[in-house]
Image (cartoon, rainbow, N blue to C red):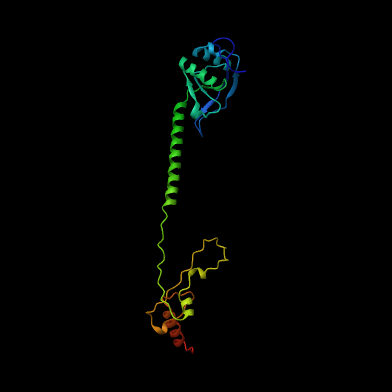
Amino acid sequence: MAGPSNAKGSTYIQVDVHYDGMFSPIPHLIYYLNQKTSITDVDFGGLNFKEFIHVLEDVTKGKCPVVYYCLGHKSMRDGLTPLKNDDDYRRFLDVAHGNEGKINVYIDHYNDSVLDWIEEEKEEKNVDSESSDEDKDSVMSDALSVDHEPDEEVIPLTKSDDPFLNYISVVPRDEFVDEDDDSDNGTKEAPIYPFHDSTQKWDTMQPILGMRFCNPQELKQLVSNYAVANGFNL
């Protein structure tokens, strides 16, 4: 089991070594076409950085010019760290202990620009994040900046002595809407009705379904003029 042994100062951890592969920044930083071996029987606490590299070269049967480590639950962009000296090696052991004694090591055989790729990937992530925030702000702004349509002008009704004329001269618009018709799910625009023009020539007046009048006398005038102009007997 990985972890400190009973000997003072000794450190037994599980080091999963990935080698004979290569790094690629596309589509994101990865290490592929590699082999893997695990080291669990070495007292890493008793080694320095150079001795650690010798262990890696002995296990991988090759040179280890550039070495990185990363925790298994982190992406390479956020967790890949270079191992270059004794200070890095001590931090490497501390990180492994904080991860239940398990850690990944990657061998860069081609001395790729891995750290530059990491910075580029982080910058791309920040740009994408800013663009996403701007899109959200734009949607919120559009939602809040809804133009308010002015209320329809209300024309006061002059009452007549005739109750029937009072009723039909200005019928509430709601009464022209079929309340049982919900086929448009409330998206259908309300109908627009014409207003009677009392200044037009008398023999050209004609009633139109839904026409609005300012007062009952206008309605009476239109009906009378239309009947006379078209030969109806009143």
Q: Quadrant of residue 120?
A: top left
Q: Depth check: 186 or 119 in front?
A: 186
| Residue 81, x across and y down, in percent | 48, 23
Pick the quarter of the image with the N terminus.
top right
| Residue 57, x across and y down, in percent | 55, 15
Residue 113, compared with residue 141, is above or below; it is above
Q: Is residue 192 left or right of residue 18?
A: left
Q: Is residue 85 among the parts visible in the rendering? A: no
State the residue at coordinates (50%, 27%): 79
Q: Depth check: 109 or 36 in front?
A: 36
Residue at the front extreme?
161
State the residue at coordinates (51%, 70%): 175
Residue 181, compared with residue 14, is above or below; it is below
Q: Is residue 90 among the parts visible in the rendering? A: yes
Residue at the right extreme?
1
| Residue 162, x across and y down, in percent | 46, 81
| Residue 47, x across and y down, in percent | 52, 11
Q: How many marks?
A: 0
Residue at the top extreme?
8
Q: Is residue 33 left or right of residue 137?
A: right
Residue 175, compared with residue 187, is above or below; it is below
